[in-house]
Image (cartoon, rainbow, N blue to C red):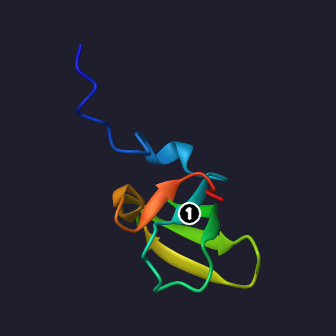
Amino acid sequence: MSHSHQRPYPVHPNHLLHSKWSTAEGYDELEYCHWEVTVHYKKSKEVLLRATLNPEATIKIDWRELRDRARWSPGWRA
């Protein structure tokens, strides 16, 4: 079985709440790099991400944007 085709992460939006994310290398549009999903708006298919270093810094995006590896990577990278 070949592992060259990776499944997009997250596989299912119900697993997003409290998941942790890092902005990808070179994606400097956001001031902070470590984020956590704090709210999942199922009707609008959006999530609210809160910066770990500044809980007042939040962004609301379509949850499918987290699949874009040019902008987001799962977990917190050092």
- Judge whether 69 appears above or below 1 on screen: below
Amino acid type at image mark 1 = Ser
Residue 66, x across and y down, in percent: 42, 60
Q: What residue is disc 1 on?
A: 22
Q: Can residue 43 be seen in this view?
A: no
Q: Nearer the viewer, residue 65 or 73?
A: 73
Q: Which of 47 and 65 is in front in this view?
A: 65
Q: Residue at x 57, y 70 (%)?
A: 48
| Label 1 neighbour load within 10 Å: few <14, some 14-19, many 20+ | many
Instruction: Name which quarter of the figure residue 43 lies in.
Output: bottom left
Q: Which residue is drawn at 47% across and 83% down?
A: 28
Residue 74, x across and y down, in percent: 52, 51
- Judge whether 37 appears above or below 50 on screen: above
Q: Residue at x 61, y 57 (%)?
A: 77
How many labels were placed on the picture?
A: 1
Q: Is residue 57 visible?
A: yes
Whether residue 78 sits left or right of residue 70 in the image: it is right
